[in-house]
Structures are given as C-alpha cells and as structure tokens.
Image (spheres, coloured by chain):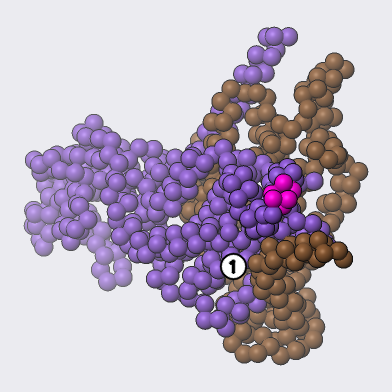
Amino acid sequence: MNKRKSLARLIIHAVLVCGSVTFLFPLLWMISTSLKPIEQTMVMPPRWVPKAYYAVIDGERIPVKKLFQLDQPSLVVRATAGERKGEKLLVPAKDFSEGQAAIEVRVADRVERVRVPAEIVKEAGKGWWYVVQKFGKQYVAEKPKWDCKPEEEIESKVHPYFSNYKEALGYIPFFTYAKNTLVVSVLGVMGAVLANSIVAYGFSRIEWRGRNVFFILTLATMMIPFPVTMIPLFATFRRLHWIGTLKPLWVPAFFGHAFNIFLLRQFYLTIPRDLSDAARIDGCSEFAIFRRIILPLSTKALAVVALFHFIYAWNDFMGPLLYLTKQETFTLSLGLQFYQSQQGGSEWHYLMAASTVIVVPIVILFFFTQKTFIQGIATTGAKE
Amino acid sequence: MTKGERRNLRNGLLFVSPWILGLGFFILYPILSSLYHSFCDYSVLEPPVFIGLTNYVDLAKDGVFWISLWNTFFYAFFAIPFGQLIALTLALLLNTKVRGLSIYRTIFFLPSLVPIVAMAMLWMWIFNGQYGVLNYFLSLLGIKAPAWLMNVHWSKPALIIMSFWAIGYSMVIYLAGLQDVPVSLYESAEIDGANFLQKIRHVTVPMISPVILFNFIMGIIFAFQIFAGPYIMTPGPGGPARSTTFYTLYLFQTAFEDLRMGFASAMAWILFLIILSLTLLAIRASKNRVYYAGVR
C-alpha cells in the first residue's frame, strides 16, 4: 500500500514537472529570442543560448555571424583576371577545373554561367560554415569580410544581446506608450476602487426596497458581450470628442463594474452586522460607517479589485484599438501591435524584446501580490 | 413606508448612484441603441435610417457571416471542453497535497497574465512555419508539421492550442473549489473501497459541479468573443481563406472598416442571443447534475 502511494506521488510529480516545462517553455523561448542577434533567430535547428562568434579572417580575429553550412565540398578561390580580379569567390569543388571557376552571374533578369580564371585559396569541406564579418549596427554600408571555416575554428562565447532591448524600444516611442498605459491603468484603478467600494456598500450593508432585483439586474449585465455595446459607445464617445483621447479607457471605471461590485459585495457581507448597528446607535451616518468601519476592514478585497483592474487595463487591446487614433495616444499593447504590423513581422528578436518588456511589470506585480491575487480569483468562482 | 425605510432607500440609492449612471450610460442606453441600429442603415457619420429587417435578411444571405459563425463554433467546441479538462486535471494534481504546490501553481498561472498582444506575438513566432520552434520539436518526432497560421486547416487548431496555454484562471478557480470539498467525504469513500478514479467521479466532480458550470459559462462568454488573437496573428481579412474570420472579428470589420454599423449591430444582437441561449442550455443540461451543498 505504502509502495503504491509513493509510486503515485512519483507519477504526479513527473506529470507536474512535464506540465511545468511545457507551460514555462514559451516564456523562456521569448526571453531567449529577445537576446539573440537576428541571424541566430533564423536557424534550424533552433539555438537556445545567444552567442557571439569570432573567427580569424585574412589574418585578423573578428566577430562573425554564421550564415550557412556548405552542402558540398567547395573551394574558396581568388579571381586572377577580368573585372573580378582579386575578388574572393566561393564555388562548389566540381565547378572548378583547369584554373577556371564557373560562377553564376545575374545579367539583367537572367542568370548566366561564366568562367573566371582563378587560383585556389583553400579547400572547404562539406559541413563547413560560411561566416561573414558582423558589424555593429552603424557600419552596415561597409563590405563585409567572409570565409569558410570548420566548426572547430569558430570561437563561440555565450553573449546575450541586451542591446536588442534598447534598439527595439528605440524603434517605437516607448516612453510615450508606457506613460499612456500608466495613465489609463492608474486612473482606472482609482476609479474602480472608489466607485465599486461605494456601490457595493449600497448593495450589501443597507436594506432598501428593490435592492435584490437591482442586484440581479447588475449581475445579468456581465452576460452582455462587448460587441453589443461597442458601436453605440463609440458613437457616444465620438459625440463627446473623446475618440483619439485616453478618456474612453478610464472614465467608465469611475461608474463601477458589475464584476467588481459583486466581488466587494460578497466581501462586505462577511463583516458582522453588529458593527454597523452599534455605530448607527452612536449616531454615525451611513457614509461615516462606510469610511470608518467597512473600508478599513476591506483593504484586501479592495486590493483584489485594484489588481484586477490594473491587469485588465494594462492588457486591454480592443479598447485602445477602437478609441485611439493618434500614435501619441497609443498604449503599449496597441503600440506593439502597430509596430509589428508596420514592419511586416520578421524581426523576431525585437518583437520578443518588446513583448518581454510589457510582460515583466505584470509578472513582478503578480509575484508581490500573489496570495491576494489567487484568493481573489478563487472567490470569483465561489458564487452559488 | 416607515421613516427608517425611506431613509434606507434614499441612502441605498445614493450609494449605488454611480452605478445607476454607469448602467444607464455604458450599458442600457448602448444596448437599446444597438437594438435600434440593427434595424437601421447606419454609418456613425450620418444619423441612422430605419430599414426594418433588411440587415437581418442581408446577414442570412451573407456567406462570410456563416463562415464566421462556423469558425467560432469550431473554436468554442474544442477550446472550451479541452481547455477545461486541462485546467481541471492540473487542479486535481495540485490538490493531492503535493510538495511545491505554490511553485507549480505559479508556473501554470503565469501564462494567463501575459497581455494578449505579447501572447499573440510569441505564439506567431512559435508557430512560424520556417523557423518555428514547435515545428522543430515535431520534426524530431518525425512529424512534418504544417505552417499553422498560414494553413487553412491548421490556423484554427493553432489558436485553440494557444488558448490552452492561458487556462490559469480556470485552474485556480477549480483548485479553490477542490480545497472546499470536505476531507470526510473522501475518507468515507475510501472506507467503502473506492479507488482514485471512483473518488473523482463520485465525490470530487459532484462536489465541484457548480464551479465546473461557472467555468464553462465563462468559457462560452469568452470563446464567442475571441478577437485580439486572430486579429493580430492572422492579419488581412481573417487568415488564409477566411479560416480565422471569427464572429467578433467580422463584426469589427463590418463596423469599423466598412462602416456598416447597422449590419454589425444586427450581428452583435445575434451573438448576444447565441451566448444567452448556450448559457441557458448549459444551465438546463446541468440541472440534475449540479449539486449545491447549500448555504455556506
């Protein structure tokens, strides 16, 4: 029996570890890609660790990038006559005979084979790398040096390219986007905490006629899909001249939201009634009871509302897409998507760097508030 | 009404007054206005003109509308049940008093925090046909994988797979539900000789059935509104051969790209009715299977 139990434990751990690896992998892959130079993102098989490569070319040790592997024995030759005199060429071994290399030259729109007199510089085996000098960003105009090298002659060092982050954020007006995102998130959080805490009090600590019907109506609004209200809301904000401003993204938070009202109401209901009754007898007004008694006891539930709203506002994509028209008002989410759609989407190292930048604040926030957060989600499922 | 009752009514209404305004401005007025627009020719730039049922008739004749409906049902049909199965399985495993619970829970939850835009970028890269890491892994298993998002048949499955990565909220809700199941029930089941699977079937599932229902309804509401993922990951009119033109995506295009707001409002109302009826269906179908342990 005991043996079977420990076997079961082992299996459970094995499954959980496999699951964890699967769930974590995409995030690690994102970070790994964000630290690679572009040519190392586009290789098969993929490489996990970003590296810097060095090789000795023409007697000089220089940083290089590995472009491709030779698929057949080849020769590095130097042209000895003609307009290409002195130029280094790479030709398959079978295309070199009697001191002449057959190379393909593009003439207008066709490709012609021409023979160039040349001398052999070195023989390169199948599987060798074609390496090209790697420049810092600013020198791309220069003609790069190149050579063919076997794996063992290429020196490699682990080297995360943190410069990707600087470059990626330099492409987009990052600080403008970050500022807009913070404005929407922070003002939204203030509105959500203020409005929902007050409204939830009215739904839980005061008995009034029609309260329960109104509360059920409130809950029912959670069922309404956003597309239903989207168009009239757009029209309303347009009439208010709010389109192209951040207002449609944070002002509504000051009027409460069914989900948060529900969350806080559930919490307020757990606070003993006697507390309010005693205060009432002492002549406290409802608002004083709310501020002096209920609010101080509800900081945790308010933190959950604040967290949920912050994450919602930070992650929101559809709202900004609908209401923001000028680039200087974009949030990070919309800005990142805009950048990606503009440049066609092959600079994966930059895209992953920018994605990491918008993920990290949320993850840090989560780590500091994990317990509150998890408890908050747990309560949402506990409605009967 | 006594004096106290009147005072309470006044105070109660005062406290909920922000919400009364919010409900009116941001929900009730938009709903009614959208219902009216669905019977109108409306471009937002000019006032709506009443045209009766024309939008609904046009919808029935619109090929892309039916494609988008099919795509959305396809997505929901696979994403919800399998996503919930994964979430529930993980929660069950985590509920075995396993050591390192909070670490595992954090790992499984983390992806759900990733903003949808970042998630879309990341999975576009993973699904990349040429250099995608997923296809590399599959090639190790000897599988020649498709170009996912570029492929008519695999673009929807790709989005479904991505949705499995973000089941953290459901998992946490399940886990909380599981932790509320009284240990005594498991103990008596054990005395009766129930094995692991029998305990899950006859104790766990009935006890957390309200939570399962809740997660399914949430799943329906979200799945039928899928938008940002396909919008970002399959740009253009909605993926290869319209294979990722989901309902809300098509609605967005007709409303904000073609400015056919009346037509889009009609679509929105049909979506509302679909979600509503599926939710009621889920509640009805589960009526005799959901067990409420009474007031806690």
Residue that appears at 60% across and 50% down: A292
Tell which of B223 and B135 is nearer to you. Answer: B223
Q: Position of residue A307 (x, y in %)?
A: 55, 50
Residue that appears at 48% across and 40% down: A368
Considering the numbered disc 1 on the image, is that residue within a helix, a strand or a loop?
A: helix
Task: Report the magenta residues as a range.
Answer: A276-282
Residue that appears at 18% across and 61% down: A141
In the picture provided, is B220 more to the left or to the right than A48?
A: right
Q: What residue sits right under mark 1 in the picture?
A: A252
Q: Which chain is purple?
A: A
Q: Position of residue A193 (x, y in %)?
A: 58, 56
Quadrant that contains the N terminus of chain B: bottom right
Q: Amino acid at mark 1?
A: Pro
In the picture provided, is A172 more to the left or to the right than B172?
A: left
Relative to B107, does residue B193 appear above or below in the rendering? Answer: above
Report which quarter residue B108 is drawn in.
top right
In the picture provided, is B102 more to the left or to the right than A183?
A: right
Q: Is residue B287 visible?
A: yes
Q: Position of residue B124 (x, y in %)?
A: 50, 53
Q: Main secondary structure of the magenta part?
A: helix
Q: Is residue B163 visible?
A: no
Direction top: furthest residue:
A2
Q: Which chain is brown?
A: B
Report which quarter residue A221 is drawn in.
bottom right
Tell which of B283 and A369 is nearer to you. Answer: A369
